[in-house]
Image (tube, coloured by chain):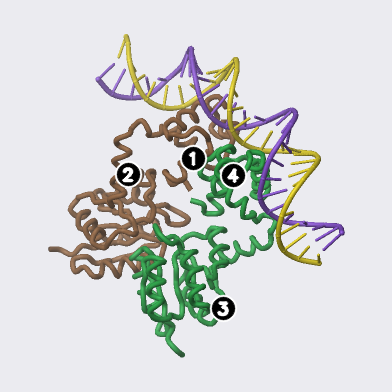
Chain colours: A brown, B green, C yellow, D purple
Amino acid sequence: MTAITVLLVDDHLVVRSGLRALLGTQPDISVVAEAASGEEALQLLEQGPVSVVMMDLAMGPGMDGIEAIRTIRERRKGQAILVFTTYDSDADIVRAVDAGAMGYLLKDAAPDEIFAAIRGAVQGRSVMSAPVASRLFQQLRNPDEILTPREAELLSLLTEGLSNRELGQRLFISEATVKTHLAHIYAKLGVDTRAAAIATAIRREGMR
Amino acid sequence: MTAITVLLVDDHLVVRSGLRALLGTQPDISVVAEAASGEEALQLLEQGPVSVVMMDLAMGPGMDGIEAIRTIRERRKGQAILVFTTYDSDADIVRAVDAGAMGYLLKDAAPDEIFAAIRGAVQGRSVMSAPVASRLFQQLRNPDEILTPREAELLSLLTEGLSNRELGQRLFISEATVKTHLAHIYAKLGVDTRAAAIATAIRREGMR
DNA sequence: CCGTCTCTCAACCTTTTGGCTGATACGGCT
DNA sequence: AGCCGTATCAGCCAAAAGGTTGAGAGACGG
């Protein structure tokens, strides 16, 4: 069995060293590099391949995790990437998987789960935390509830607290169209006021 | 110089081991116990004193960090407690300090900052991350913008997407009173719609 | 080619919200 | 005793938001 090499990408020093300590207990896994940002991760990957990249999604200013995943997958086809993050928002999960992540782990995952995900990732298997998987399935089961791109755009602006008039101006559409989109969004989210839409958007979709 | 003993309280295993590894580099600091919840922390403290408690605020189900801080301070007067968390929301900072925390560190703080905070805490000095301190000062400079307890309560419910009528029913007050409170909240937050109030509340106050 | 989806817009009407003014009551502080 | 902050309520009016129906233009796939 060849050793599995890991690159850690997380802007929090404590998380990196914690993960390093945790993975150090496994003889077949070794952390060979750490990066505090997406840019740094790309740089490090230039210098040599690793079996798996473990990446946080929220990483302060600059390139975010999703962007980093997409860029890495463009440059190194087939690179195994695991998302290791605190939150399990629907939007993040879908976008991460879409960008090319092999798995999605939460930071409170059990050690065994983390080890299994890493070993699975190098073999091309996709492993994710149970709560994450259930959210993904829920998305697939209810395609009616998936917002169209335009609706998602509008919802995103909605969470900034804009009025219908302002939304129209921002998106270069009439107020009437804004109201139409909103009506569709409300139906899909199962709410009937913009306040509730904002609340569920932020809580469900992680729009912060 | 006596050794400083530390109790780590965080529901994330990786954060605990990361912090343990980091603090292990300092000869005068040693992590003597770890807890994954507020309840567990209280139990451990029964068994013996520590110099400093380092506590996360968000810890899954059960007792939250603020509650844990308050309880610890009740049982062991003078116990030094440092908050070590990811987010720097105004509300959390104020409540943590109010509950009796000696300092407030962000998880992306530099190692030296963390060491300094721990050493300061055992000496009774209060140390906090720069962004945290600036937020605290801002609160003190603008007392006009501090919400009254009732207003905060209402704002919290507002972020759930309730209508004025529902707010009134929940709080056992008339819709007229709800509107009065809302008007005051809008003025203090510097907004003029409930949507914007929800947006700023969630972003500024960390009401998730 | 036709159906479906998406995005766009309009008119109409009801409900909700926001702005304003004013009022009562209670507690604490001076 | 008087003042201030907080919490409570009312009424009025204008603005914003929500519900409904209908409809046209592209795009895309069967």
Q: Does B153 sit left or right of D11 as displayed?
A: left
Q: Nearer the viewer, mark 3 or mark 1?
A: 3
Q: Which residue is mark 1?
A: A156
Question: Dividing the image into 4 quarters, which one contains the N terminus of chain A?
Answer: bottom left
Q: Which residue is mark 4?
A: B172
Inter-mark Cα distance, 1 to 2:
20 Å
Q: Does A67 sit left or right of B87 as displayed?
A: left
* Callout 1: SS: helix
Local crowd at mark 4 within 10 Å, few (<14), some, or many (≥20)? few
Local crowd at mark 1 within 10 Å, few (<14), some, or many (≥20)? some
Q: Chain of mark 4?
A: B
Residue A118 placed where, x, y %?
Answer: 23, 58
Q: Does B42 sit left or right of B74 as displayed?
A: left
What amino acid type should be assigned to the residue bearing mark 4? Answer: Phe
Residue A134 placed where, x, y %?
Answer: 29, 45
What amino acid type should be assigned to the residue bearing mark 2? Answer: Arg
What amino acid type should be assigned to the residue bearing mark 3? Answer: Arg
Inter-mark Cα distance, 3 to 4:
44 Å
Q: Which badge, 1 or 2, is on the more N-terminal residue?
A: 2
* Callout 4: SS: loop
Q: Chain of mark 2?
A: A
Picture layout, residue B102 above or below residue B86: below
Residue B98 visible in the displayed image? yes
Q: Which residue is mark 2?
A: A135
Local crowd at mark 3 within 10 Å, few (<14), some, or many (≥20)? few
Q: Which residue is mark 3?
A: B125
Is label 2 on the same chain as label 4? no
Q: Chain of mark 3?
A: B
